[in-house]
């Protein structure tokens, strides 16, 4: 896909305009400079400079007359003029005649002293400007002294030598471009394809192989490989930006290509850091799995979203400033002023955000905990930036703003080490004291035999005589991590209690009224007969039931 777009770009360039000048006139008339060099205004000096460096009327000696060579050691005006034009071309400076002042005594209003100077582009070329010396406007001596340095900066890493080598191939024109430019395009296209192949080989094969060899194949494929591919595309864009300016393409096209390349650089860097946020999040996810707290598992996605949002904001600012060459200071100032209004209008949102921060700092609960507070009653499923998601016992979802949770009094049942179980066992009034005593002993043995009960603290006593029953308090604790296991332990304990009661003959009471006819003729009394032998029955139960459970 990348090769296709690059090929279309070069075809578009090939059928472009044949003009090589940085100077663009708004009308269709060809300006006339004449045989002499006119330096009477910034307008005429600019026309004289570019006109005499055009291919159709190439007179670098006349263009050199627009340079102030005062103080320059061993000046070569013609060479400096050519380099200056190449700087304009490499920087993509597009000059329109309508913007150049045609006044002999023009002064820059932005300068403090109102000097007679004119800047072409203060942001891209702050060191190149015209200055009035006597009655003539020339490129200032300071600007001329900067030409060699700016030329090396515009064509780095020896690419400046190609400016002299490529034109020797031939100047015949095809499709609006010279032969040497078409040859350079072909070489550059071949170089891009070759670079793309090499980067693909290194990234997809070598890097992935190294990660798989050391046991991190999944990490390399899911996280490192996407980042490396974007880096390879970024290197190709850097390669293009270095060499394509050597071709000295028509300025109308080159200025737009330069904007695209400048925009692509911060855009690709933004994508690289955006994908690196996933790598950082994966690392912290691995660390979070080693901790007991499940709240860390929720913090990692929030951190990933925050990093990505930060990368997008910063990357957008760099794209606007470095790519599109826009002044972002007014934009930032507007954000600061508008931020006050937004903060006032979004007080609840900000409160919820800081509430989430306090939850992650104080850690009053973690994912999976059962919490209650007022109308809140359920299990925590997720903690977000704005709200916490709680699953109620009706299986519905409750979204509670974090600001409300931060200010509320929470009862965290999930942080309990022991879970209390309290109930009252009611037996009938006809149960003799000896049987009650044995029944209580059996209950205590059940608690001691269970693997998940607290052995050092429980209370089982015959403690009340109610209106219809004799009451035994059953007060114990389970040492289990969640509610489900607590219910399972309750089930086991209650089953053992019922078995114990059936074994030794204890009857559970319920609200009834019993009429006893003690002296009714020829009828047996309704009072049950208790033959004794309770201790033997208890020992039989303990041996059969409790020992069987311990096996």
Image (spheres, helix red, strand yellow):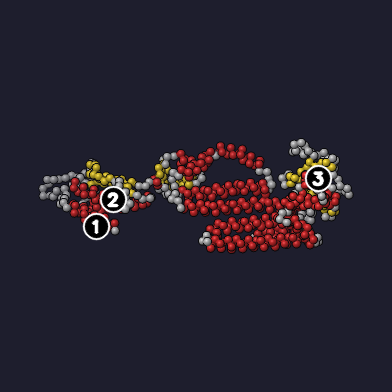
**Which element is circle 3 on?**
loop
Q: In terms of depth relative to the viewer, which is nearer, 307 or 64?
A: 64
Relative image position of residue 339 (x, y in whole percent): 59, 39
Q: At 23% across and 56% down in the image, what residue appears?
A: 543
Q: In terms of depth relative to the viewer, which is nearer, 40 or 32?
A: 40
**Which element is circle 2 on?**
helix
The tag earlier along the polypeptide, 1 or 3, is 3
Residue 194 numbered mark, or none? none
Per the image, the residue denoted by label 3 is 71
Relative image position of residue 236 (x, y in whole percent): 66, 57
**Which element is circle 1 on?**
helix
Quarter of the image where the N terminus is located: bottom right
Q: Nearer the viewer, mark 3 or mark 2?
A: 3
CA distance separating discs 1 and 3: 114 Å
Per the image, the residue denoted by label 1 is 544
Relative image position of residue 544 (x, y in whole percent): 24, 57
Q: At 69% across and 59% down in the image, what residue appears?
A: 6
In this picture, residue 487 sits left or right of residue 390 = left
In this picture, residue 145 sits left or right of residue 486 = right
Residue 241 visible to an observer of this rendering: yes
Residue 447 numbered mark, or none? 2
Q: Are marks 1 and 3 in contact (CB under 8 Å)?
A: no
- Image quadrant in which you'd find residue 161: bottom right
Q: Label 2: few (<14), some or many (≥20) within 10 Å?
A: many
In this picture, residue 537 sits left or right of residue 350 = left
Q: Label 3: few (<14), some or many (≥20) within 10 Å?
A: few
Q: Label 1: few (<14), some or many (≥20) within 10 Å?
A: few
The tag earlier along the polypeptide, 1 or 2, is 2
The correct choice, above or below, for 213 with respect to 91 in the image is below
CA distance separating discs 3 and 2: 104 Å
């Amino acid at each position: 896909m990348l090769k296709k777009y690059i090929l279309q770009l070069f075809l578009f360039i090939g059928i472009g305009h044949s003009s090589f000048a940085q100077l663009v006139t708004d009308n269709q008339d060809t300006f006339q400079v004449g045989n002499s060099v006119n330096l009477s205004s910034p307008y005429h000096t600019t026309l004289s400079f570019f006109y005499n460096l055009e291919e159709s009327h190439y007179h670098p000696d006349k263009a050199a007359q627009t340079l102030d060579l005062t103080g320059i050691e061993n000046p070569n005006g013609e060479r400096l003029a050519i380099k200056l034009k190449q700087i304009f071309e490499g920087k993509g400076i597009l000059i329109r005649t309508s913007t150049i002042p045609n006044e002999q005594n023009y002064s820059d209003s932005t300068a403090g002293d109102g000097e007679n100077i004119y800047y072409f582009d203060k942001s891209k070329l702050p060191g190149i400007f015209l200055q009035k010396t006597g009655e003539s406007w020339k490129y200032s001596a300071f600007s001329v002294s900067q030409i060699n340095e700016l030329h090396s900066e515009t064509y780095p890493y020896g690419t400046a030598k190609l400016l002299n080598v490529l034109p020797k191939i031939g100047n015949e024109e095809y499709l609006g471009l010279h032969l040497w430019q078409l040859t350079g395009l072909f070489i550059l296209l071949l170089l891009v394809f070759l670079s793309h192949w090499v980067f693909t080989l290194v990234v997809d094969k070598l890097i992935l192989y190294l990660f798989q060899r050391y046991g991190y194949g999944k990490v390399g494929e899911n996280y490192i490989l996407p980042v490396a591919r974007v880096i390879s595309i970024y290197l190709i864009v850097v390669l293009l930006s270095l060499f394509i300016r050597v071709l000295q393409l028509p300025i109308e096209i080159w200025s737009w290509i330069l904007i695209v390349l400048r925009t692509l650089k911060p855009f690709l860097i933004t994508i690289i850091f955006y994908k690196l946020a996933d790598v950082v999040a994966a690392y912290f996810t691995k660390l979070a799995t080693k901790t007991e707290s499940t709240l860390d598992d929720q913090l990692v996605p929030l951190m990933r979203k925050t990093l990505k949002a930060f990368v997008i904001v910063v990357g957008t600012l760099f794209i606007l400033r470095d790519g599109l060459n826009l002044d972002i200071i007014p934009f930032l100032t507007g954000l600061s002023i508008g931020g006050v209004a937004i903060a006032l209008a979004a007080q609840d949102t900000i409160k919820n955000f800081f509430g989430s921060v306090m939850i992650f700092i104080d850690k009053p609960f973690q994912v999976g905990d059962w919490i209650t507070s007022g109308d809140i009653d359920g299990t925590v499923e997720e903690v977000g930036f704005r709200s916490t998601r709680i699953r109620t016992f009706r299986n519905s979802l409750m979204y509670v703003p974090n600001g409300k949770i931060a200010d509320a009094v929470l009862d965290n049942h999930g942080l309990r080490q022991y879970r209390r179980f309290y109930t009252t066992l009611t037996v009938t009034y006809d149960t003799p004291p000896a049987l009650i005593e044995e029944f209580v002993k059996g209950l205590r043995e059940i608690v001691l035999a269970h693997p998940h009960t607290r052995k050092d603290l429980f209370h089982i006593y015959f403690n009340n005589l109610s209106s219809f029953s004799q009451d035994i308090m059953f007060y114990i604790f389970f040492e289990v991590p969640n509610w489900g296991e607590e219910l399972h332990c309750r089930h086991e304990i209650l089953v053992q209690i019922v078995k114990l009661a059936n074994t030794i003959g204890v009857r559970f009471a319920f609200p009834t009224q019993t009429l006893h006819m003690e002296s009714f003729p020829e009828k047996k009394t309704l009072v049950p007969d208790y033959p004794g032998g309770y201790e033997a029955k208890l020992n039989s139960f303990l041996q059969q039931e409790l020992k069987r459970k311990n096996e």
